[in-house]
Structure formats: structure tokens, C-alpha cells
Image (tube, grey):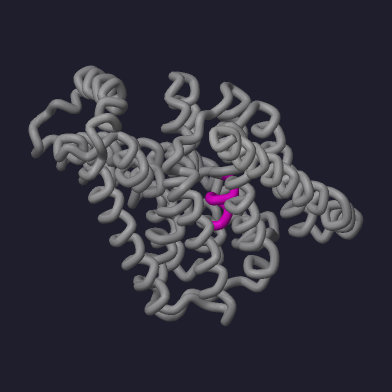
């Protein structure tokens, strides 16, 4: 029965997210918003809607560790696993706006979540700050889209043609009442699917003796990220590589601002933050977001070898969670190796990459002046 609820909940979440994205995307595009902004707002919200539904259901049911664990785990998975896997399929192109704007916003949101969590809880007022920032961010993206130059609009023309052809094939040219019905139907499926998934995850945690936090960081994070996985891999396979990166980064921003914000607002009291989450998982989430900048700067792309590194780090992170949950004898050795060799080597590599890229940029700027 638990397995049936788990699988059924995942299927309903995927179907609900798909319906929501279909209906909302057509409405957004019809208003003249650019495809990139649609991807960073409507599609990002749609693919993050399972996280929102699950976290709200978990908070309402008193399983608060599931809620925050789901958000932090999903953000780590979005970058390390999803982008890593997509980059293995094809090297990913990183849009300049994502480097200049979205990644710094993701880093800022992650740091703000960490700062708000220092007292061991996230209050309703702090949740309100996240929601306010969500509204400001979405409004800014729409305003920014409408101020795009004619040259940039022509760049989007090909993507808009593709989107229009997809719309015709998938019946997106339905009347507005039908689009609203798709949105309502998607929300209903998300509501039911999230409830099933929370029940199944809680039962599994109790049966295996694993904490709800670990379940939220692993099973729930993977399950609710299925829309992001599907959307990103599909975009990478079709050659829409900038969209693949934008979806993963945009969804991570929405996970913090939207999911944590609304979960905090509907919680009966301040949302408690598990010490383990504050001590280890949130710093990992921040480190992953920060690591995006130097990697993305390198040729404004994610190479296959960098995708393999991302996947390797996600495997290492997951292994640590498993060892920690079981208090395995190998945990201390594994932690020592990661802290003494792997992490310092990674930090050194990132510094070298930044120095090389900055050096190239300075030399390129100096040449015209000679």
C-alpha cells in the first residue's frame, strides 16, 4: 500500500505539474512575455509546484522536517544531478543573463535562508519576506522582458515559433476557459499527489528507522524534482540547452522564495529548522550555488567533464546522508577524506578557474588599447 501511494503520488505530481505548465505557459506567452522569462517564471513555478504542494502538505500535517528537507534536497539535486546529467548528454550553453542575474539571485536567496535559520526557526515574518521577494523578482523579470531590445526579441523569434508549433500539436490553442481548466486540474492533481507522497514518505521513514529529514533530502527531493528532470533533459536532447540551465536555476530560486515562503506562512507556528540541516545540508546548498559562477564563466557553458563532476559530487553527498542515517563505522573516515582532500581540492580548482578566466578577460580588454 505504501509503495502504491509513493508511485501514485509521483505520477500525480508529474501529471499535475505538466497540466499547470501547459495552461499557464499559454496564458503567459499570449501576454507577450519572452520565452526566457516564461521559463524563469511560469515553467519554473510549474516544475516547482510539486515541491510547494508537498511542503505545504507536510507542514499542515506537522512533518516540518520533510518540508525544509524537500526544498534543500531539491536545490542540491537540481544543480548537481539534473544539470550534471544534462551536460553528459550535451554540453550546456549558459545564457549571459543567468550568469549576471539569476545565479547571484540564487546565491542571495540561499544565504538569506541560511541567515534566517540561525535562530533554529523560520518565522511567519521571514516567510513573508520570501513571498515579497518572490513577487518583486517575478515582476522585475516581466518588466525586464518588456524592455528587451528588438535584436533580443528577434533572437527569441525561433523559440517562439517552436513554442507555437508545440502549442498547436498539444492543443494549447484552446479557449481561455480550457486553459484555466487545465490549471485547476493540475492544481487538484498536485494536491492529491502531494498528500499521497507525504503519507508514503512518512511511513517509509518510520519503517526504516530513518529520520524524516533524510527522507525529505533524498526520496522526496528526487520525487518532486521529476518535472525538472523531465523538462531539463528534454530541453538538452532537443538542443535547447540555455533553456535547460534556466529551468534548473529558476526552479531553485522558486523553491526558496515560494516554497519556503508559503510553507512558513501557513505553518501554525514558526517553522523549526533541524540542527543537521543548518550544520551540513544548507552549507552544501550554498556551496553548490556559489560553485555555479566560476563553472558557468568558463566559456559560458557546462562541459561534459564538468557534468560528470557534478554527478560525482551528488553521489558523494547522497552516500554521506546514507552513512550518517545509519551511523555507519565508515562515516568518520569518509568525512575526513571529504574535508581534508576533496573539498579543498575543489575549492582550489574553482579559484584557479576564476583567475584564468579573469586573466583572459583582462588581456582581451588590454589588446585593443595597445
Q: Nearer the viewer, residue 11 or 117?
A: 117
As for residue 53 lying within the magenta part, the answer is no
Q: Is residue 8 visible?
A: no
Q: Is residue 219 visible?
A: yes
Q: Quadrant of residue 69?
A: bottom right
Above or below, 29 relative to 106? above
Query: Which residue is depicted at the point 48% across and 41% down?
Result: 248
Query: Which residue is depicted at the point 65% across and 33% down?
Result: 307
**x, y percent for residue 216:** 57, 56
Q: Quadrant of residue 124?
A: bottom left
Query: Which residue is depicted at the point 57% across and 43% down?
Result: 79
Query: What main secondary structure does the magenta stretch of the protein show?
Result: helix
Q: Which residues are magenta?
A: 72-77
**x, y percent for residue 208:** 69, 55
Query: Which residue is depicted at the point 39% across and 55% down?
Result: 52
As for residue 75 lying within the magenta part, the answer is yes
Amino acid at each position: 500500500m505504501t509503495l502504491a501511494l509513493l508511485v501514485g503520488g509521483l505520477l500525480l505530481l508529474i501529471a499535475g505539474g505538466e497540466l499547470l505548465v501547459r495552461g499557464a505557459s499559454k496564458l503567459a506567452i499570449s501576454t507577450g512575455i519572452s520565452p526566457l522569462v516564461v521559463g524563469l517564471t511560469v515553467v519554473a513555478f510549474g516544475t516547482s509546484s510539486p515541491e510547494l504542494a508537498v511542503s505545504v502538505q507536510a507542514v499542515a500535517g506537522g512533518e516540518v522536517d520533510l518540508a525544509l528537507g524537500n526544498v534543500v534536497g531539491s536545490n542540491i539535486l537540481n544543480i548537481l544531478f539534473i544539470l550534471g546529467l544534462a551536460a553528459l548528454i550535451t554540453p550546456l550553453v549558459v545564457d549571459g543573463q543567468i550568469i549576471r542575474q539569476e545565479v547571484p539571485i540564487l546565491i542571495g536567496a540561499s544565504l538569506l535562508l541560511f541567515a534566517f535559520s540561525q535562530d533554529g526557526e523560520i518565522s511567519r515574518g521571514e516567510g513573508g519576506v520570501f513571498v515579497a521577494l518572490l513577487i518583486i523578482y517575478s515582476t522585475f523579470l516581466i518588466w525586464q522582458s518588456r524592455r528587451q531590445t528588438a535584436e533580443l526579441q528577434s533572437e527569441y523569434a525561433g523559440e517562439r515559433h517552436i513554442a507555437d508549433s508545440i502549442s498547436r500539436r498539444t492543443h494549447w490553442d484552446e479557449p481561455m476557459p480550457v486553459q484555466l481548466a487545465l490549471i485547476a486540474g493540475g492544481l487538484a492533481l498536485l494536491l492529491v499527489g502531494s498528500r499521497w507522497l507525504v503519507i508514503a514518505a512518512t511511513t517509509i521513514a518510520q519503517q526504516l528507522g530513518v529520520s524524516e529529514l533524510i527522507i525529505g533530502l533524498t526520496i522526496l527531493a528526487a520525487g518532486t524534482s521529476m518535472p525538472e528532470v523531465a523538462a531539463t533533459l528534454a530541453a538538452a536532447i532537443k538542443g535547447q540547452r540555455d533553456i535547460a540551465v534556466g529551468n534548473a536555476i529558476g526552479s531553485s530560486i522558486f523553491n526558496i522564495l515560494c516554497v519556503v515562503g508559503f510553507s512558513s506562512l501557513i505553518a501554525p507556528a514558526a517553522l523549526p529548522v533541524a540542527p543537521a540541516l543548518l550544520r551540513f545540508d544548507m552549507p552544501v546548498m550554498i556551496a553548490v550555488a556559489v560553485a555555479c559562477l566560476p563553472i558557468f564563466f568558463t566559456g559560458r557553458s557546462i562541459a561534459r567533464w564538468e557534468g560528470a563532476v557534478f554527478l560525482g559530487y551528488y553521489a558523494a553527498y547522497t552516500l554521506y546522508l546514507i552513512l550518517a542515517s545509519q551511523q555507519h563505522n565508515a562515516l568518520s573516515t569518509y568525512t575526513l577524506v571529504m574535508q581534508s582532500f576533496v573539498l579543498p581540492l575543489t575549492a582550489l580548482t574553482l579559484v584557479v578557474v576564476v583567475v584564468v578566466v579573469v586573466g583572459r578577460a583582462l588581456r582581451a580588454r588590454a589588446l585593443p588599447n595597445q
